Amino acid sequence: MRLSTLSYTPIVAALLLTGCVTTQTHDSKVAASLSVAKSGQIDEAIRQVEAQTQGNNKTDLLLNLEKGELMRIGKRYKDSLDAFEVADTKVKIWEETAKSSPQKLMGQIGATIMGDASRDYEGQDYEKVMLTTRMAMDRLNLGDLDTARVDIKRTHEREAVIAEFRSKETAEAEKEAKDKGVASTGKELNGYPVETLNDPEVLKLKNGYQNALSHYLAGFVYEALNEPGLAAPGYRKAIELRPDLPVLEDGLKGLDQRTSFRRKKGVTDVLFVIEAGNSPARQSKKIAFPVPTGRGLVTISFAFPVIYPDPNAPVINSIRVGNQVLPTALVTDFNVMARKALKDELPGIYTRAAIRAVTKGLVQDQVNKNFGPLAGLAANLAVAATESPADDRMWRTLPDRVFVARAFLPPGDYDLNFGNRGDVSKITVDGRYMVVPVRVYQDKTYLGDLAKFGSVTPVAQLEAEPEVKAVAPKSTGKSKPVAKAKTVTKTTATGTTTTTSTK
């Protein structure tokens, strides 16, 4: 005898309670902050995200990344560092576990009924790398070149940990999929826009965590610290990650001259870091799974994350500094890096979804078998309700694209313009090295504090005395010539120049 509708209602309710997720998506949490930041209201954007990092969210990895980035845009560098250090503490724990007990992290490979959004967020790999890079940039703005060097070194070490762990994780995921009889591939995802992950820009990336900005900045910092032996590998790696860009190639090509006595005098080596827009959002797309059961195929729908290419991605080909036009180089494209990370992550997402599909398909089949078609229909509705939207957690306040330009400029005041934009910023160039951070939105440009290091090497002023012509006395017919003035110029290791005149 079949159970009544009231009899199978608790079963359906249990399914709903097990998986129905009503938590806000990350994109909905930060959407308002992103919007007001773009309009120029950076203080309001910071206030909104600070309100979210209270109570249980005080140490939330992703929200602190968002807060730190907004504070950086707002030139609150110390506060930005504080937020980044909270996030960095979480990433350090991940690093130590990845090195000492990688199996603990791989435990998250298994499927969860609640979906991927319920798993602990450990940060995308490129986010982990950019975190230490951002901390280094904050320290540059605070004038702390030595500690920035420490963060640069940690960036390289973090990349090595990520590379080793991901290699182990890939092997473990393939093993688990094989043990459970699930193919760990995305080829079965009929309806998934694979072209978003297989476009040439994505396929061209070496991996999903290294970026040319981090390594070019490392080269610049080591150079400013007079460590050309460490600067060269940084520039070289940046070129490897983003080949055929003259701006990057010149960084390596001119290193010997810039760090020797042949360096140009009376000018400042200025690095412009122009960041445009915000990184893309992950969108949720439903994909149908056919699950074989003892009573035939059962179709289960699951949500998968999709990142669509930004057709309006900002392009800044050049900047104008005074009367000089400087070419720029696109060194990092987070729209592409985010898709590369998703491409690498998709097999694991698919594996977990497939295991959930089998589990939920069996539930549907058993309800239909034991309690009849009406109960089976209710179970179908319950299973659909238990599937949450795709995990959309990403560091959204990161820029969409990063461009760099570099030039030797005489100290002084300059008008600064980006591309054909109407707004003009003003900067004062000074120091031996200088970094100019900029965030550009469609309707607002934020010019960060200028980071200046060292003193301008002065141009040697040759103040030779005028030559004195000898006048022969008429009484002797001969005269002793007067010695010409001789100027001696010495330049010390610190760049201080002294000029003396002798006869």
Image: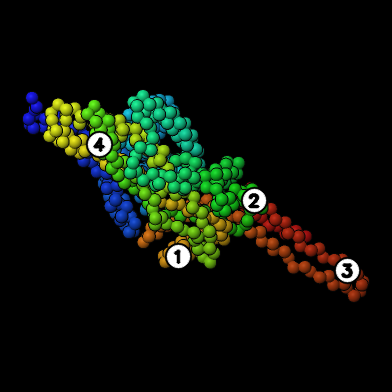
Query: Where 225 sits versus 179, above or below?
Result: below
Which mark is in front, 3 or 1? Answer: 1
Foreground: disc 4 or disc 1: 4
Up the image or down, 7 lies above or below 235; here it is above
- Of the two numbered discs 3 and 2 in the rendering, the one whose residue sits closer to the viewer: 2
**Of the numbered discs in the image, which one, if any, rests on residue 299?**
4
Which of the two marks, 2 or 1, is nearer to us in this view?
1
**Which of disc 1 and disc 4 is earlier in sequence?**
4
Say which of 301 and 370 sits in front.
370
Spot occupied by residue 221 in the image (x, y as percentages of width and height):
53, 46
Disc assigned to residue 257: 2
Q: Residue at x 60, y 58 (%)?
A: 266
| Amino acid, disc 2 | Gln
Closer-to-camera residue (277/311): 311
**Residue 255 shows in this picture:** yes
Q: Position of residue 11 (x, y in %)?
A: 14, 30
Residue shown at 24%/27% (left/top)?
A: 294
Q: Quadrant of residue 478?
A: bottom right
- State the separation of the CA atoms marked 4 and 1: 53 Å
Residue 362 seen from this side: no
Secondary structure of the residue carrying numbered label 1: loop
**Residue 53 falls in image quadrant:** top left
**Sequence-earlier tag: 3 or 4:** 4
Pointer 1 residue: 420
Residue at the spot 14% in from the left edge and 26% down from the top edge: 370
The amino acid beneath tag 1 is Asn
Which label's residue is closer to the chain start, 3 or 1?
1
Quarter of the rendering occupied by the C terminus: bottom right
Please give the residue where the numbered disc 3 appears in the rendered image.
479
Crowding around mark 4 (Cα neighbors within 10 Å: few <14, some 14 to 19, many 20+) is some
The amino acid on which the numbered mark 4 sits, given as a three-letter code, is Thr
